[in-house]
Image (cartoon, rainbow, N blue to C red):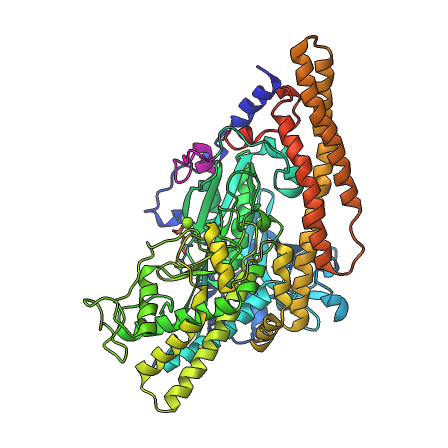
């Protein structure tokens, strides 16, 4: 057997080290591990002095600032609990604008002054940390305001233990802020947007007669897609190591054409991995629920139950971390990149989003009574209006280098933002617009001023996978976010723009009511006016079709194909105005995000291009040359023909590599980040694509054991 084939046989081996988990008898209460590593409300109830616990809970429920006097007691209890769980360190855990998480660890031990040390953790240490933050991207914020940033305890997201084979760390979710109060992270704007949405939504539900609800919570359930490949291949590929995507690789004879992977039987090794990853997540209180194979070979999905947005977004980060960590125990690597392999589907993260009152009403659920239905349609219209107005911002909120391979590539929603309502909901809106009942049998269900609505609720089964923003029965599903993204910013945008349109519509309705209008008529009028004004954003057809591109253009919808096209939407006048008006982001904070995201794009593409040049010159070109040398030794016409073929490719490759190297060192000198980004997108990526095209052709003719990189056919199919 050739060395290469032996390689694959080795890669296919795995041992069920996680097999030690064995089956669990969940009828025995102590076997239920859910939340055992979390300083949860239940744990707090047990460990905190009664009055402290009570005060803390009321503060949290009302969304009020925390009384610093409470922090000391909480820190004390948290430390005791953490020590019992084997923690020796604590860490403030936060989400800088890079999109990943950051942490700084401190030991609990403080010297006593007499040569010893005691475990110590004060309220002050709980509340505030001072990471040396100067190296985090901040889009000039700290330069403008203050040199340093600090982390601040977020008591609404419970602390947890991060286990490690050699110890454990008490991990405290925190916000990351400059000394002058500018948000340097994704958590603060998210929290602010939840407040803004709550205010606007409470205003609206009050008009509908809800006098009990005090707060409206937004919710998120994010379905995470990912690839698993054997770690051996990962470490053999410098492109995967540096960029998490394959920069080279010929299309394998078998890809996803047979449609035999989606929802197929999960391979044993992968399932063993999933059991362990999910168990870890459950211990951390992450409510993971669903797992299945995805469309591409070796692609999978994990979905949690939805939670309030802040917790859901923190848990999303934990999911990504645990997926990565656990994979290594099974000899696998989890790839979260949006497009690790050309030619098969990439990975997204469907962001299911809704909002509900603290009295338990899901405002995106049609409900059982006429007035609930009308309220639901009011909220739905607000979403429609928000998405129409801020389609550019929404597109920008999911714009990253990885995403440019996915959006608009017939595998993920197009770059055009539109809303899918489904037949039933569309019919309801059309009825409101025309005043004509849809269905004689069910019509009159409302029996109100309108008498036109069909009986809701609607069926989530009415699906359209090609829509970026779909109503799915009791929530909206924003399908455009990428698998590698933090969903904090996306949800911040959704909440803010919904707050704005809700507030506008509620104010209009209020004015009508004060003017003496009848309730149902007034609501119907408001819904109708906004539906008619903004219904161009509704599209229930095939989002992948060319016809939609034309249709969308004629409707005047934006089609921002790439990241440099989309990101300027972040700093458009209306974006800045909306964020500012609802107290979510100040203008400098918005600009900082624009700068950081654009810079990330530039840096990521630059890393890809330099990695590609290096691989092409030092691995692929030598393989081609070796093949030429081999052919030199072989006499005969056949060899001659082969040599001509190979020589042409190799010569071409040399030229293209040189061109890429030149592109890599000729970045324009400019302060305009978008100009820099467009240079990378057009010139650099263009030069890289030409190198890849030839390299992939060479892969198909160079002798197998000369080829330096694991192939798609190996990485994608050996499990
Ligand atoms: P599908 O793949 O058909 O979209 P899944 O079961 O994989 O369905 O995922 C559905 C996701 O939607 C889950 O994460 C679920 O928790 C989430 N979800 C359900 N209801 C809500 C809601 N009210 N708010 C936010 N997310 C929700
Ligand atoms: Mg799903």
Left or right for 578, reference 450:
right
Q: Looking at this view, is 119 or 238 the one in front?
A: 238
Ligand 1, by image quadrant, is bottom left
Residue 586 x %, y %: 64, 73
Residue under the point 37% across and 58% down? 472
Left or right for 642, reference 82:
right
Tell me which corner region of the image, top left, top right, bottom left or bottom right, holds residue 159.
bottom right
Residue 268: say if magenta.
yes
Q: Looking at this view, is 102 or 259 the one in front?
A: 259
Left or right for 361, reference 151:
left
- In this picture, which residue range is highlighted in magenta? 256-273
Tally of marks: 0
Residue 224: say if magenta.
no
Q: Looking at this view, is 692 or 203 the one in front?
A: 692
Name the magenta segment's main secondary structure: loop
Residue under the point 48% across and 40% down? 299
Left or right for 55, reference 71:
left
Residue 86 x %, y %: 56, 50
Above or below, 419 against 443 in this view is above
Above or below, 705 against 284 in this view is above
Image quarter of the N terminus: top right
Q: Looking at this view, is 428 or 552 the one in front?
A: 552
Residue under the point 72% across and 51% down? 679
Which residue is the extreme one toward the left? 441
Residue 557 x %, y %: 51, 63
């Amino acid at each position: 057997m050739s060395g290469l084939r032996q390689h694959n046989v080795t890669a296919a081996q795995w041992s069920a080290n996680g097999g030690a988990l064995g089956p669990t008898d969940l009828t025995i209460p102590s076997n239920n591990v859910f939340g055992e590593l979390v300083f949860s409300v239940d744990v707090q109830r047990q460990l905190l002095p009664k009055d402290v616990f009570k005060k803390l809970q009321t503060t949290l429920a009302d969304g009020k600032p925390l009384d610093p006097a409470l922090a000391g007691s909480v820190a004390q209890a948290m430390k005791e609990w953490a020590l019992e769980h084997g923690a020796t360190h604590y860490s403030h855990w936060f989400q800088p604008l890079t999109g990943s998480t950051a942490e700084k660890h401190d030991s609990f031990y403080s010297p006593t002054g007499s040569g010893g040390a005691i475990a110590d953790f004060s309220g002050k240490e709980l509340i505030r940390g001072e990471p040396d933050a100067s190296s985090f991207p901040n889009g000039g914020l700290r330069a403008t305001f203050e040199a340093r940033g600090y982390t601040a305890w977020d008591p609404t997201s419970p602390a947890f233990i991060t286990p490690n084979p050699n110890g454990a760390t008490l991990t405290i979710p925190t916000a990351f802020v400059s000394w002058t109060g500018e948000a340097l992270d994704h958590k603060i704007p998210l929290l602010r947007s939840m407040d803004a949405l709550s205010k606007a939504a409470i205003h609206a539900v009050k008009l509908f007669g809800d006098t009990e609800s005090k707060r409206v919570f937004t919710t998120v359930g994010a379905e995470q897609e990912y690839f698993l490949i054997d770690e051996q291949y990962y470490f053999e590929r410098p492109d995967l190591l540096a960029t998490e995507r394959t920069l080279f690789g010929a299309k394998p004879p078998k890809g996803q054409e047979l449609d035999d992977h989606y929802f197929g039987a999960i391979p044993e090794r992968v399932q063993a991995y999933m059991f362990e990853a999910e168990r870890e997540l459950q211990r951390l209180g992450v409510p993971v629920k669903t797992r299945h194979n995805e469309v591409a070979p070796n692609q999978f999905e994990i979905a949690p139950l939805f939670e309030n947005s802040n917790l859901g977004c923190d848990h999303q980060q934990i999911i990504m971390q645990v997926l990565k960590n656990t994979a290594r125990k099974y000899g696998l690597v989890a790839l979260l990149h949006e497009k690790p392999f050309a030619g098969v589907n990439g990975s997204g993260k469907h962001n299911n989003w809704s909002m509900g009152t603290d009295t338990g009403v899901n405002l995106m659920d049609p409900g059982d009574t006429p007035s609930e239905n009308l309220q639901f349609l009011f909220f739905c219209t607000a979403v429609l209006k928000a998405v129409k107005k801020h389609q550019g911002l929404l597109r920008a909120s999911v714009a990253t280098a990885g995403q440019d391979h996915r959006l608009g590539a017939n595998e993920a929603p197009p770059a055009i933002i539109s809303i899918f309502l489904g037949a039933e909901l569309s019919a309801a809106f059309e009825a409101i617009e025309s005043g004509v009942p849809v269905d004689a049998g069910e019509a009159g269900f409302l029996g109100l001023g309108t008498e036109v609505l069909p009986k809701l609720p609607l069926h989530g089964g009415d699906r359209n996978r090609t829509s970026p923003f779909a109503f799915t029965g009791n929530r909206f599903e924003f399908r455009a976010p990428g698998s590698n993204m933090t969903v904090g910013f996306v949800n911040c945008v959704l909440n803010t723009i919904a707050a704005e349109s809700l507030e506008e519509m509620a104010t209009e309705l209020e004015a009508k009511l004060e003017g003496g209008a009848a309730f149902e008529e007034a609501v119907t009028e408001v819904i109708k006016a906004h539906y008619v004004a903004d219904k161009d954003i509704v599209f229930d057809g095939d989002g992948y079709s060319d016809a939609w591109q034309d249709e969308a253009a004629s409707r005047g919808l934006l089609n921002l194909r790439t990241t440099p096209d989309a990101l300027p939407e972040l700093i458009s006048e209306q974006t800045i105005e909306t964020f500012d008006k609802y107290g979510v982001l100040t203008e400098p904070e918005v600009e900082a995000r624009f700068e950081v995201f654009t810079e990330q794009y530039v840096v990521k593409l630059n890393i890809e291009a330099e990695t590609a040049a290096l691989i092409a010159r030092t691995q692929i070109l030598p393989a081609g040359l070796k093949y030429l040398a081999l052919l030199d030794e072989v006499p005969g016409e056949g060899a001659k023909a082969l040599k001509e073929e190979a020589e042409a490719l190799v010569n071409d490759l040399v030229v293209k590599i040189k061109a890429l190297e030149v592109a890599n060192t000729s970045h324009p000198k400019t302060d305009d980040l978008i100009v820099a980004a467009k240079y990378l997108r057009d010139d650099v990526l263009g030069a890289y694509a030409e190198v890849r095209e030839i390299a992939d052709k060479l892969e198909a003719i160079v002798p197998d054991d000369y080829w330096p990189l694991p192939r798609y056919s190996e990485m994608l199919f050996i499990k």
